[in-house]
Image (tube, rainbow, N blue to C red):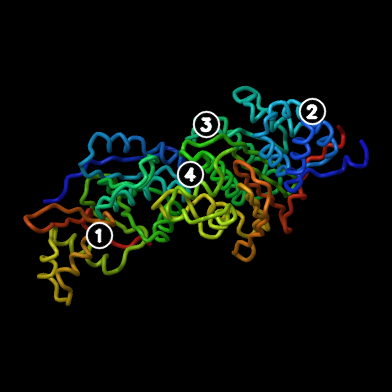
């Protein structure tokens, strides 16, 4: 591996990675991805999301799997449903799971076990039970949002969940290939006036906007803010052409919004490191041995 | 004459109640009941005896949904979104709560209070009028007072309340209070000639604390 192998694939350069692939087809995967010796959970999931609708998405996934990096394989296996009933790809640190609206309803034993493992790893990593339980509830609520709100016709679209836990730190991601925040909120006349993804994300963050007409504020994100109220976490929301990085400061939510190339779907990522202001780069997958 | 209710008890057998999808699944029996008995008043009792924790999204999709559908029915509202089976629509539903740990009840109370709606916590799931009802959520103190008057008098009209009161409140004022209580699903009403007679769904009320 050359000097480039230390490059980090994170949520900010995932889009550049996809563009490179788009320009050079599968050669782009082989030529571009191997340069990244490290990656974050958010970077991987973001890359998955931005390339999911690529005309050669299937071929690209095959190429990625040839790299044999455990996190990539785990993510792609989860998405393709491999090991769904039998032996899921497991690691002490990370695991991915597909979100399937058709067998959600809170009684999917596979999902339940997946959550239990996440909870167990949070506790092992040094997070107290109360906080870990709050994180798990927030995680479940965000996954549920995929089922409840991601498809424009209300039937739900498929999504992907992943977590990565290290000593005193963790990250989780939830993404879907659905309609995004703006189109979803347009289902409620109260939010029909929103004209951009930026406004839609900020309405969710600051006004608890929800697509269900006449039912008041959404509750899922409240759980998220409550769980992370004073833990220095950073929450990233990506939908359409907007990325918002939200920090919780003294009970307030401070959102830093930036423009991105447009994507289908949405991605939520949370990073949390105990005792410090969290950063996506606090927890990385190191692939330098490959 | 008080309204006769069809009653339905929903008792989720899980310790942790969260998520709208699970909530909607728990309401399946109610959906069936609504389809079969569209014009009958239905009293749904949510028995949270086995619950150790409950999330806002679960409360919103169960108790909250029932209360808002009931309110829309009481206020003569029209359903707008026909595409979503879980949109708010006018349904003759009343919803009460029984069981539940202090934490669960606090979360319900907090949820209802924030949305300025209320429900009744009862001792056991039996038919109304319930012996003791504790008001969860937010209810204007004037309405609490009116509710207690209705409960003590049985079946009353706005005119009855006006005649029995020494306060300077018009019949219209009493009528407004009664219709507000109907919207909160704490009283039922039946036609009595040209006026409405209201009956409380409980015999005694106090604010939950």
| Apparent side of residue B151 relative to residue A288 in the rendered image (left or right) | left
x and y, in percent, of residue B156 in the image:
13, 60
x and y, in percent, of residue A278 in the image:
72, 55
x and y, in percent, of residue B188 in the image:
20, 53
Discs 4 and 2 carry the same chain letter: no
Residue named by callout 1: B181
Sooner in the amino-acid sequence: mark 3 or mark 2: 2
Residue B32 sits above or below residue A198 on the image: above
| Apparent side of residue A51 relative to residue B138 in the rendered image (left or right) | right
| Residue furthest front as drawn | A23
- Quarter of the picture containing the N terminus of chain A is top right
Residue B114 sits above or below residue B47 on the image: below
Name the subunit of mark 2: A
> How far is disc 3 from disc 4 in space, using C-alphas?
14 Å
Marks 4 and 1: which is nearer the front?
1
At horizontal 59% and vertical 39% (from top left) the residue drawn is A176
Residue named by callout 2: A68
Residue named by callout 3: A108
Sooner in the amino-acid sequence: mark 4 or mark 1: 4
What is the number of the mark on residue B18? 4
* Callout 2: SS: loop
Locate residue B147: give its quadrant: bottom left
> How far is disc 4 from disc 2 in space, using C-alphas?
37 Å
At horizontal 72% and vertical 46% (from top left) the residue drawn is A11
């Amino acid at each position: 591996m050359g000097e480039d192998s230390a490059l980090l694939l994170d949520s900010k350069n995932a889009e550049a990675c996809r563009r490179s692939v788009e320009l050079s087809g599968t050669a782009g995967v082989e030529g571009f991805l191997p340069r990244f010796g490290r990656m974050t959970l958010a970077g991987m999931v973001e890359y998955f999301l931005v390339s999911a609708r690529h005309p050669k998405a299937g071929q690209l996934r095959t190429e990625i799997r040839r790299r044999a990096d455990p996190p990539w394989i785990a993510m792609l296996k989860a998405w393709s449903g491999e090991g769904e009933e039998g032996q899921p790809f497991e690691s002490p640190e990370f695991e991915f799971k597909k979100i399937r609206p058709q067998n959600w309803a809170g009684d999917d034993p596979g999902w339940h076990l997946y959550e239990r493992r996440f909870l167990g790893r949070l506790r092992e990593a040094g997070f107290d039970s109360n906080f870990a339980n709050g994180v798990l509830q927030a995680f479940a609520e965000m996954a549920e949002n995929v089922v409840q709100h991601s498809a424009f016709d209300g039937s739900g679209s498929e999504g992907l969940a992943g977590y990565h836990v290290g000593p005193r730190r963790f990250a989780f991601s939830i993404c879907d290939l659905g309609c995004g925040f703006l189109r979803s909120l347009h289902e409620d006349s109260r939010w029909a006036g929103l004209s951009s993804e930026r406004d839609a994300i900020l309405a969710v963050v600051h006004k608890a906007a929800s697509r269900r007409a006449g039912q008041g504020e959404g509750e899922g994100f409240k759980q998220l803010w409550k769980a992370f109220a004073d833990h220095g976490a950073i929450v990233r929301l990506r939908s359409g052409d907007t990325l918002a990085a939200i920090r919780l400061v003294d009970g307030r939510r401070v959102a830093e919004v930036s423009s991105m190339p447009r994507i289908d779907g949405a991605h939520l990522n949370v990073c949390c490191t105990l005792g410090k202001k969290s950063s996506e780069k606090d927890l990385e997958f190191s692939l330098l041995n490959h | 004459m008080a309204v006769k209710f069809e009653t339905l008890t929903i008792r989720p057998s899980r310790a942790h109640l969260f998520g709208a999808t699970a909530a909607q699944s728990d309401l399946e029996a109610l959906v069936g009941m609504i389809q079969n008995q569209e014009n009958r008043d239905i009293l749904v009792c949510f028995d949270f005896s086995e619950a150790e924790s409950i999330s806002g999204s679960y409360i919103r999709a169960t108790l909250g949904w029932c209360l808002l559908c009931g309110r829309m029915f009481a206020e003569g509202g029209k359903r707008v979104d026909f595409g979503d089976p879980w949109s708010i629509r006018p349904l003759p539903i009343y919803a009460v709560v029984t069981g539940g740990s202090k934490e669960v009840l606090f979360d319900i109370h907090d949820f209802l209070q924030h949305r300025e709606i209320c429900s009744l916590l009862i001792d056991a799931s039996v038919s109304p009028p319930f012996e003791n009802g504790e008001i969860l959520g937010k209810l204007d103190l004037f309405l609490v007072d009116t509710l207690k008057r209705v409960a003590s008098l049985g079946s009353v009209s706005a005119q009855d309340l006006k005649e029995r009161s020494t306060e300077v409140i018009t019949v219209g004022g009493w009528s407004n209070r009664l219709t507000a209580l109907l919207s909160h699903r704490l009283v039922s009403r039946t036609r009595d000639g040209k006026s409405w007679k209201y009956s409380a769904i409980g015999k005694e009320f106090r604010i939950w604390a």
